[in-house]
Image (spheres, helix red, strand yellow):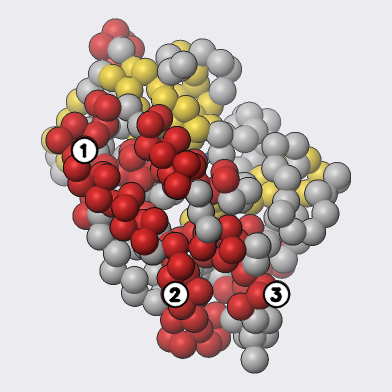
Amino acid sequence: MPLRPRKLIRKMRGGAQAHLLECEDNGFYVVKFLNNPQHRRILINEWLSNFFLRYLQVHVPDTALIEVGADFIAENPDLYFSMGSRKEPVQAGLHFGSRLAVHPDRVAIFDFLPDKLLGKVENRVDFLGTLVFDKWVGNADSRQAVFFRARAKTWTPLKGDAPNRIGFLAQMIDHGFAFNGPHWTFGDSPLQGLYFRTSVYEEVRSLDSFQPWLDLVSHFPVEVVDSAWKEIPRAWVQEDEAALEELLDTLLKRRKRVVSLIGDVRGKRASAFPNWR
Ligand SMILES: Nc1ncnc2c1ncn2[C@@H]1O[C@H](COP(=O)(O)OP(=O)(O)OP(=O)(O)O)[C@@H](O)[C@H]1O
Ligand SMILES: [Mg+2]
């Protein structure tokens, strides 16, 4: 069921000009709108990526369809896109929402952590799983994450123990440029998709360090891709029905390539994995 917004909180930074909305479920959502300045396809990329990452048990935010009505838009003159000096209105309809894991007035959410704290992130290993994912989907952007202190409730690690204490957790965000953003192509430049602080890759000692994600992606179930596809609102797809089918087809054909794509990263920048000898 789509959620309705209750209150506009503020505009977020970034090229998609997302806005933070408090919704009827009392959740706070960073909402990317269908007519955002980047492209309509950004929403599909976000939807698919979050779905797939959830299957890979990488910690991602809950997501939802956010239904913004004409009345909400009329009541909130601060809700618009800045196109140079021009204001572009947000269209009414179904949009993509990424839920904040914590109440933004009670718990600080950070876009970056200093290296020392980054080393203490409970689910640091998720950066390895996400790299496998980013290589698979040809994420043309650098890896992005948010951090906050919490007890891991919604996240079960595939590797290591579930931390039962309060600590820093990372959630992977911003998948607008999976599939090369609006282009739906795979450039496969070796350095794309890496996190800007390579200390998160310190525990990589061999290709094996990327397990179980290498195996999970290599054998990624067609059924999961199908379920993700079925959930995409048709209003997002529009005339892209055939292009979307082709994209997902290509994605399935690429499953087995992740091993060599990870190898390409090492070939291009061995320093990204200082302990892989
Ligand atoms: N689930 C979330 N929890 C907390 N903060 C979030 C969440 N999703 C997005 N944000 C915040 O909103 C900002 C904008 O989101 P995002 O990076 O996805 O937008 P973007 O417009 O695609 O950015 P870019 O210009 O990097 O492509 C992020 O930098 C982050 O601070
Ligand atoms: Mg971003």
Label 3, on which residue? 203
Asked which quadrant contains residue 231, the reply is top left
Residue furthest to the bottom? 277
**Vertical relation: 51 (above or below) 79:** below
Residue furthest to the top? 71
* Pick the front one: 214 or 97: 214
Q: Position of residue 31 (x, y in %)?
A: 40, 32
Going by the numbered disc 2, the residue's amino acid type is Leu
Label 2, on which residue? 261
Residue 28 badge: none
- Numbered disc 3: secondary structure: loop
* Pick the front one: 241 or 126: 241
Are there few (<14), some (14-19), or many (20+) residues within 10 Å of tag 1? few
- Residue displayed at 50% across by 49% down: 221
- Residue displayed at 60% across by 43% down: 109
**Vertical relation: 251 (above or below) 131:** above
Q: Position of residue 242 (x, y in %)?
A: 19, 42
Asked which quadrant contains residue 115, the reply is bottom right
| Gap in angstroms between the C-alphas marked 2 and 3 | 19 Å
- Numbered disc 2: secondary structure: helix
Q: How many marks?
A: 3
Q: Position of residue 213 (x, y in %)?
A: 60, 61
Going by the numbered disc 3, the residue's amino acid type is Glu
Residue furthest to the right? 164
Residue 241 badge: 1
